[in-house]
Image: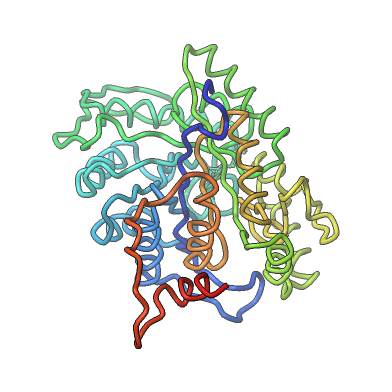
Amino acid sequence: MTQPANNSPLDFFWFIPTHGDGTYLGSERQQRPPEFAYFREVAQAVDRLGFPGVLLPTGQACEDSWITAAGLAAHTERLKFLVALRPGVTSPVFAARQTAALDRLSNGRLLLNVVVGGNPTELAGDGVFLPHDERYAQAAEFLKIWRQLVSGETVNFDGKHYRVENGRLDLLPAQERPPLYFGGSSDAGQDLAAEQVDMYLTWGEPVAQVAEKIERARKKAALNGRKLRFGIRLHFIVRETEDEAWAAADRLISKITDEQIEIAQARFLKEMDSVGQRRMAELHGGRRDKLVVSPNLWAGVGLVRGGAGTSLVGSPENIAARIREYQAIGIDTIIGSGYPHLEEAYRVAELLFPQLGLGTKRSAPREVIANEFSVGFHGAKRLQASS
Ligand SMILES: Cc1cc2nc3c(=O)[nH]c(=O)nc-3n(C[C@H](O)[C@H](O)[C@H](O)COP(=O)(O)O)c2cc1C
């Protein structure tokens, strides 16, 4: 990036918790079930707060990302929807037709996250039985077909995994081609990124590890004459002070038992063949006393949650400084989240966005004249005047 890091453009996305939400990890207390009405609350809040987009995850425990995004598009104005393209699980032609429909319905607000999958047990339940690298070979064919179709071409394809004769879309997407996002840390994953995707995503590893990873991806892309953009997926626990933030982090995992951690870590190691997941798990090794893995970067969520397992924890000033470090190595997109997602979206927007020059520029209220019913601005003006 040529601009100074703190002025570099930054897209700060949020997350729709389509598998449910809650105040504590590992506890039934204060949980929120996955309900469309709640997703709508989160989507409308983040749309108004100035987040440009949301990620909708995919998996056995998630509400379907396409159908949920279609529903949410009708209740939001600017928000973009990052939904999952699933090679192997859906057909590339069917996915291309869905792409056109959802992009048209949302007036060009569709982004695609290519999810090849890292859990062979879950994939078997979806009817996918290919080993890790072969899944990526299938994904490469899938994306070639999908890309040609959404670009308006007629497709004749005879590959190892797919065969299509005279495939075409009569109705094209609103965008020229909805952008492809993708996260996979293996060599095969990086090869796919280098050849076909626009935005390479990583879960939140320490800056040095992310730098090394994206440098490898950048070099592979250059060999194909291509340039990638880079994004990072992180949870956030932002509070007015460092102490408050770390207390909130401790509270979030305060109800997790050692047995839950053991079961979750064993499952991630036994069931999953994802390199990205292994890199996440290695950050803390399942130990509660090894959770601060670099300044302000905390691995507590990963004790029991697969996938994104790290959070930036701290004051707005310190978290903004950490974000600038990621920007300095080439990250231009953040996909954030936090428990619960509605409240934490407000905290990020109200505490962190001003540090980063982000968010909706709402018109400032005119000076409020205190009267018998109101001291104006929750009393702030009167307090200032008298102090
Ligand atoms: C930002 C990001 C989001 C992801 N979202 C999902 C998801 O919603 N569902 C899923 O099953 N895997 C998801 N993944 C996992 C990857 O799609 C990939 O299948 C997995 O990491 C295995 O790839 P690897 O061995 O190349 O790391 C995500 C990964 C990243 C980095």
Relative to 227, is 289 above or below?
Answer: below
- Quadrant of the rendered structure where residue 155 is? top left
- Quadrant of the rendered structure where residue 188 is? top right
Relative to 159, is 15 above or below?
Answer: below
- Quadrant of the rendered structure where residue 95 is? top left
Q: Is residue 174 left or right of residue 148?
A: left
Q: Residue at x 82, y 61 (%)?
A: 288
Relative to 367, is 195 above or below?
Answer: above
Question: Which residue is at the front of the view, 361 or 169?
Answer: 361
**Residue 15 location in percent, x, y?**
47, 55
Q: Residue at x 26, y 31 (%)?
A: 150
Which residue is farthest bottom?
A: 372
Q: Residue at x 71, y 49 (%)?
A: 297
**Residue 264 location in percent, x, y?**
71, 61
> In which quadrant is the C terminus drawn?
bottom right
Q: Is residue 280 left or right of residue 375?
A: right
